[in-house]
Amino acid sequence: MTTATTQIRLGAEAPKKTRTLWQNAARHILRDKLTLAALLVLGLMTLLCVLGPPVVENVLELDVNRTSIPDKFLAPGAAGHILGTDHLGRDQLIRLLYGGRVSLAIAYSASVMTILIGVALGLIAGYYGGRVDDLITWVVTTLSSVPTLFLLLIAAAFWTPSAELLIVILALLGWVGTCRLVRGEVLSLKEQEYIAAAQAVGVPNFRLLVHHILPNVLPIVIVTMTIIAGNLILVESGLSFLGVGVQAPTPSWGNMLTDSRSYFNIGTHLVIWPGVLIMVTVLCFYLVGDGLRDALDPRSSWRLAE
């Protein structure tokens, strides 16, 4: 009698198929209602800001830069303006949609560029070490010692701020933390036995970095990117408050909130809507980051309990 037949007669169960980290993470996120709700809100808000402006312009016949002094400070719902008008009579709804397009574009684009720069330099510094590591570490230490806000103010003094320029500047100044984090992970990973085995059989360094080390760094990188995206929306709002963010007439949630603070007593709705959108968006980014951190952590208590 074969071993297989014996196992079947004894009622032995077939070994369960092991799930990957990403499969486990997806299962966890599908069970996490708070993270799912935050993802849904972010997705819906992004979709509205991308597709909403042309729809609103064609249906309501509104123009983001059309001014009408007699219609200034209209309350929400008055004269066909769903969210009211500002101090120049411009429709608040269409400006919020366009402003969200700019603010979210800065958050998404700058965070992706930041991650790409930080991950690339962190992988190189951690894996190769030596003088390469010393040079990158010196740059990281130098940039970390100077407050980012001062560097942004200096850059704004030389160049007129725009959404595109702001994305580049934020990415060039924001990769330091990601680089330091990835470098530390790589220093730990390259001491593992499977890396030594790959090196022993002659696996090229580039293939080793891309196929063996990078996949193990991705979970923490993805979580970091969501947190960076939320921070960048706050940074853009802070720069607009100082007058060095996205400049008028291009709307963004940050400069809309800054411009409306002077009219709080006669146009409260001008302050409320951009402030609420900034708060909700940043909160959703943080909730998504927190959920991804738990989902991608192989030591999480929920995974050990399964």
Image (cartoon, rainbow, N blue to C red):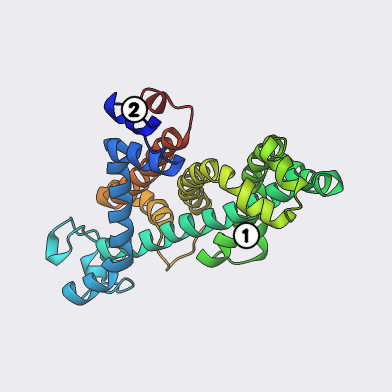
Question: Which amino acid lies under the numbered mark 1 shown in the image of this protein?
Answer: Ala
Q: Position of residue 10 (x, y in %)?
A: 29, 23
Of the 4 image quadrants, the one containing the N terminus is: top left
Question: In the rendered view, does 140 fall on the left or right side of 65?
Answer: right
Of the 4 image quadrants, the one containing the C terminus is: top left
Q: Residue at x 22, y 70 (%)?
A: 56
Circle 2 SS class: helix
Total count of labels: 2
The residue under label 1 is 156
Residue lying farthest to the right in this orientation: 131
Question: Which amino acid lies under the numbered mark 2 shown in the image of this protein?
Answer: Thr
Question: In the rendered view, does 231 fall on the left or right side of 270?
Answer: right
Q: Nearer the viewer, residue 199 or 82?
A: 199
Calculate the distance from the C-alpha at mark 1 to the C-alpha at mark 2. 77 Å
Q: Residue at x 75, y 49 (%)?
A: 201
Circle 1 SS class: helix
- Residue 123 lies, with reference to residue 164, above or below; the image says above
Please say if the residues under marks 1 and 2 sit with CB atoms less than 8 Å apart: no
Task: Judge depth for marks 1 and 2 and give the one in front.
Answer: 2
Q: Position of residue 46 (x, y in %)?
A: 33, 58
Q: Nearer the viewer, residue 204 or 73?
A: 204
The residue under label 2 is 6
- Residue 43 lies, with reference to residue 51, above or below; the image says above
**Which image quadrant for residue 5?**
top left
Question: In the rendered view, does 195 fall on the left or right side of 276?
Answer: right
Q: Nearer the viewer, residue 5 or 212?
A: 5
Q: Residue at x 18, y 63 (%)?
A: 81
**Mark 1 closeness class: few <14, some 14–19, many ≥20 residues within 10 Å:** some
Q: Position of residue 100 (x, y in %)?
A: 36, 59
Earlier-in-chain disc, 1 versus 2: 2
